[in-house]
Structure formats: structure tokens, C-alpha cells
Image: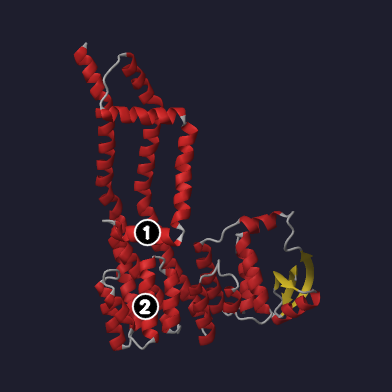
Amino acid sequence: MSRFTYTAEKADGEVYKGLAEAADRFELYGIVRQEGGKLISVEETSSKNWMSMAYWNSLLSHISEYEKILMARNLGAMLSAGLALARALSVLERQTKNAKMSAVVSEIASDVRRGETLHAALAKFPKVFPKLFVAMVRAGEEGGDLAASLQVVSDQMERMYSLKKKIRGALIYPVVILIAIFGIGALMMIYVVPTLAQTFAEMDAELPTSTQIIIGISNFLVEYTVVAFGLVIGSGVAFYFAAHTAVGKRGLDFLFLRLPLIGPMVREVNAARTSRTLASLLSSGVDVITSIDIVREVVQNSDFQEVLKDASKGVAGGESLSKAFVRREDLYPAFVGEMMAVGEETGQVAEMLKRLALFYEEEVDRKTKDLSTIIEPFLMIIIGAAVGFFAVSMITPIYQLSENI
């Protein structure tokens, strides 16, 4: 399969450029004819030239969540304006600045030109497009309104992206403060404490246990600075990999659910994600069991995934969707099960789920705004305790020495 850059002219005289993969130039002529164009010029390019900067850009670049949202939104807008799918994908390919995204869209466009459906072409890139994206596109193609489905999936992904950004933004302040505390503490241990320790040694002062502990830590950091920093970095790397194992992930999920401030927010975030994703899928015509299975991937907490697994089995066995959520009110708030039950009774499950999503998204938004204010007193207590312990430990021997003089 070769990659071609070409210039073509449409029947109305519009000249445009495109990039496509084809077995040879004859297949390329057929692809352009299907677009309603006539080839003016064509140039073959190597898609895997490891000497080219474009190849390495494509290999090393990352496709962000925001770029996927833009792709869905722009593609939906162009389809609504009347552009053919292959033509719209060609425009997207030229517009995107991300080399990897451009390569992915190019392959999708080539598959579509050869007669494949868009959802089948997207499904070839599971690391780029999640099952939610593929399922919504498939529902749009089967329902005959692909543009509307793309708009729905872009809105869904944007809300999830916005929610994630708000939570991360709320946690930046305490994380920065804690890093600063440890950084300043390490500098004092390396540069300040050794001077005081030397003074105490010269005056043969009797040191309290707390002072001996601080001096011991300081001596270790001074003598084995590289080892100490290596241990910190190694611990961070080990924690990262342990957190990505099944046991480590379940342990972190268990911990987050039981933290005083974070636990209630975790429940509400997962309630919002579940409600929003289920509402989008069901309103687009995706069947209930497939929708629940897709939501299990969106909801990343293992405890909530178990609830959704039970819900899928229950629905397959003829049980109502709300029952699994009512049984696990320790995870999902009681309001979730109640609203689902009302939706089932009135035949408006998707609408009730949208209201649920809005409610919990607003709750999480409010709490993330207040999180920094709530955490600040706890940080002050931690900082005060650390500074107080250090001050008392280092000042006590000085007072003892002054009394003996």
C-alpha cells in the first residue's frame, strides 16, 4: 500500500489537495472519482520513511483528548453542511497540526474510500478511539444521522474532559504545596542542620531523641545524597507501576473511596460519568447491555465496574436496570437508583439520566471550587506541625547549652 499526495478538481471547478493510501495510481484514480473529482497531479510519498521528520513526528506525537473532541465536532459540522464523508475526512487530515492524528485520519479516510463504514475504520485504532466513540458513530450510521451522533459524542467527551480538568486543577494547589515543603525540608537537612549538628558536637551537648532523629536523617542525606534521591525516584516509579497492576489499582480505588474529602467526590464523579455516558448511548439507539459494557470502560474505578457488571447480568436476565444501582447505594448515591426507576416507569430513562448527569456535574464543579479552601487548613496544620517539630528539636539543645553557660 502506497501513500499519494494529489491535486484534484471538482465538477464545479473547485481545486483541492488530498492525501490517500492506495495499491497503485489506478486505484487512486478510482478513489478520486468516487469523491466527484478529477486528478490534476499526483505524487507518491513514502509513508514509513524513517529518515523523514514527519515519520518521527507521527511516531512520537500523542493524540490528546481535546483533539479527539475537535475531530468529532468538526467532522459532524462538515457532514451537517453537506460534505461527503471522504471529503470531510480529507479536510480534517489537512487541518490537523498533530502528525499522528493526521496519519490516523489518513488511514481512516482511505478505508472509507474503499467502502468501509466509518465505525469499522475507527475500530482499527482502539488506543485512539474508545468504544464509546465507535459505538456512537455506529449508532449514527445505522440510524442515518451520523452528524447528530458525532455532535452527541463530542459533547459527551467534552463534558468528561472538562470534569477531569476541574478535578486536576483543584488538586494542583495542595500537590505544589507538599512538593515545596519536601523540597525546602531537604535543603535544610543538607545545608542548615549539619552546621547546627557540628556546633552541638563541639560543645558536647546532650541531644533529645527528636534532635538525634533529625541529625541522623541529615547525615544520611549529606553522605548519600545520590542514593537518597535515587530512592525517592525509585519509590515513585515503583508506586506508578504498582498502581497500574490489578491489585494496586483495586487498593487505590479502595483508599480513594474512604478518604474524608475525596471519597464523596469519587462517588459523585462516577455517578456523573455513568449517567452522562448511559444517556448518550441510549438516546443514540445503542442497546442497554452494550451501553452498560461501554460505561464499564468509561468508569475506571474497579468497585463501580463491579456494579455495572452486575447490572449487565441483571438486565440480560430480565431485571430492571435500576435494581443493580439500588442494591449498591454504598457506592452510587441513592438518588441514582431512584431516578433510574422513575425513568423506567415513565419510559424516559435517557432523559432522567441526563438530569442526573447535570445534577452531579454541578455538584462536582461546586466541590472542586471549594476543595482548595477546604484543604488549606489541613495543609496549614501539616506545615505547622513539621515546622514546630523541627524548631523544637533544634532549639531545645540551644536553650540547654545557654542554661549551662
| Residue visible at 39% across and 42% down in the picture | 179
- Which residue occupies the extreme top position in the image? 405
- Around disc 2, counting alpha carbons within 10 Å, would you say few (fewer than 14), some (14 to 19), or many (20 or more)? some
- The reply, left or right, for residue 252 in relation to residue 124 is left
| Residue visible at 50% across and 78% down in the picture | 135
Image quadrant in which you'd find residue 122: bottom right
- The reply, left or right, for residue 290 in relation to residue 50 is left
* Whether residue 94 is visible: no
- The reply, left or right, for residue 311 in relation to residue 78 is left
Kind of residue indicated by mark 1: Gly
Kind of residue indicated by mark 2: Asp
Coloured how?
Answer: secondary structure
Circle 2 sits on which residue? 310
Measured along the vertical axis of the image, is residue 14 above or below residue 219?
Answer: below
Label 2, secondary structure: give it: helix
Q: Quadrant of the C terminus?
A: top left
Label 1, secondary structure: give it: helix
* Whether residue 342 is visible: yes
Circle 1 sits on which residue? 251
Q: Residue 119, position in %: x, y?
A: 57, 78
Mark positioned earlier in the residue sequence (2 or 1): 1
Image quadrant in which you'd find residue 359: bottom left
Q: Quadrant of the N terminus?
A: bottom right
- Around disc 1, counting alpha carbons within 10 Å, would you say few (fewer than 14), some (14 to 19), or many (20 or more)? some
Cα–Cα gap, marks 2 and 1: 21 Å
Q: Residue 191, position in %: x, y?
A: 40, 25
Measured along the vertical axis of the image, is residue 283 above or below residue 273?
Answer: below
